[in-house]
Image: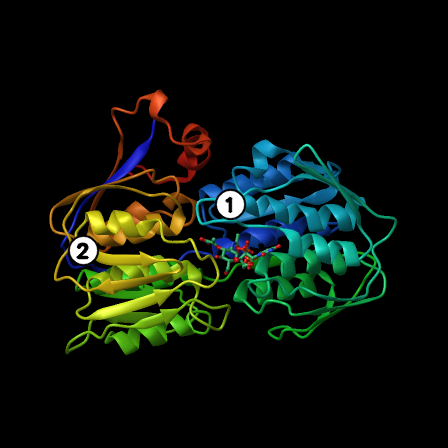
Amino acid sequence: MALWMYEIEGARPLSGRVRISGSKNASLPLLAAALLADTPTTLYNIPVLRDTMQMKRLIEHLGAKVTFSQGVMTIDPSGFKVDNVPYDIMCEMRASFYAMGPMLARLGKARVSQPGGCAIGDRPVDIHLRGFKVLGVRMTRSAGYIHARHKGLVGTRLSLMGPKGTSVGATINVLMAAVLASGTTVIDDAAREPEVIEMISFLKAMGARIEGSGTNTLTVEGVESLRGVEYRVSPDRIEAGTWAVAALVTHGDVVLENVDPVACESTLELLERWGAELSDAGPNAIRVRRGKGTKKPLSIVTEPFPGFPTDVQSVFTTLLALTPGESDLRETIYPERFKHVPELNRMGARIKLEGSRITIKGVAALEGAAVMASDLRAGAALVIAALAAHGTSQVRRIYHVERGYEDLVNKLRGIGAVIRRVEEADVDPGLMVSSNDMYDAQVEELIAPHREVGT
Ligand code: EPU
């Protein structure tokens, strides 16, 4: 069984230019939303990632014809007739749940495996289901599946408030159903993340009628049908934050190209407060350097947009682990999202975890070690730590990282990192830690044709 890892020789300043890829979390729902149209859609700037390739597989399973080359994905939805998402697909990627909105809107029914928890904690879908129910969907559960059907989606007023605030996924899923419902749907407590705004722009280009983009209340006038469009996915705000931190912890000088500064605002603001020098490097480009003076510890709370995003919390943990003084970080979106902490501590960090909060005592340096990624962003934090650390690190279970960072090895090499993607020679199938490990080999088949030679 082939499993891959990164071998990284750290403590080298990164320097040069790196281009931010298309956003993963925008691409995934847009690919699903292409199923809402009667005619083909072409999406540009789709990143080659395990998750986007998995979404391609899912929409093919649902009957669409999909082509993909050089970041351009064309989806012909005319064969979209399949109304189920089996467990095998759902358990590999939770974003598969985005199929439910289009299935209900176009097919009138859906049979979807109920997603479970994941490495970052419990991830329920109750808000999605509540939204669908209010639109007129009847649902039952059996044997781990949700069976849903309706006799016509009917617009109404609904709230997407949940125990931890609103939900990005539920806002997008319910929107996808509401655009083809009859009458007016008013969605209160909608999420305002850039990915939601992007979905609204995309749906409007397809012919949907939606007002209130960027606010917590969305008003949707249902339409009879939608048409396919050509659309360019915006840059990944989390990738931008990740490479910015990589530049800073390695004492580097890196220009990030293709950045959306509005989507990254809270991240960039915190980096400046920490002491980073961020300067304009041309249209949509930002130069990132440490700047002069002592770096300041931070006190951070993750919040819904426009607050500090949970998805860069882990890489900030690495940054603060190397910042003099005591920092603290509280996670309000996924209270258990700290799997990177024990691994960082093995590299010499001094981080104490208490409930959903960590206290970080800055150290002067980290030491290379063999560490294991348990999820995408935890993996990113470890890669960044390895780039800063003295000596060689091995970051294992990198399929998690490759869910969300396109062409990571080439990008890092392009700015001077010494990183190799190598096979873990001695993996005993008896030691596999999850079904994901088995899946790694299949994913490799999906991504390999798109990867440049030599990585
Ligand atoms: N929640 C519920 N019930 C629901 C849905 C969500 O209680 O029905 C809770 C969640 O458990 C969480 C909070 O509400 O505590 C927010 O979850 P949300 O639904 O907003 O998250 P999501 O849509 O499942 C997306 C991204 C995540 C990102 C979050 C928050 C995708 C595919 N995923 O997840 O990205 O962390 O929004 O911004 O877009 C990542 O990229 O690493 C990642 C996990």
Establish if 273 lies above or below 390. Answer: below
Q: Along the horizontal axis of the image, is 112 left or right of 266?
A: right
Could you classify mark 2 by the number of other residues whose Cα lies within 10 Å: few (under 14), some (14-19), or many (20 or more)? many
Residue 136: image x %, image y %?
Answer: 82, 54
Q: Along the horizontal axis of the image, is 393 left or right of 203?
A: left
Q: Residue 57 falls in which quadrant of the image?
A: top right
Q: Amino acid at mark 1?
A: Thr
Secondary structure at numbered mark 2: helix
The residue lying furthest to the front in this view is 354
Secondary structure at numbered mark 1: helix
Q: Amino acid at mark 2?
A: Ala
Q: Which mark is residue 52?
A: 1
**Residue behind mark 2:** 388
Residue at 42% from the left image edge and 56% from the top image edge: 21
Q: Along the horizontal axis of the image, is 294 left or right of 23?
A: left
- 3D distance between C-alphas at marks 1 and 2: 29 Å
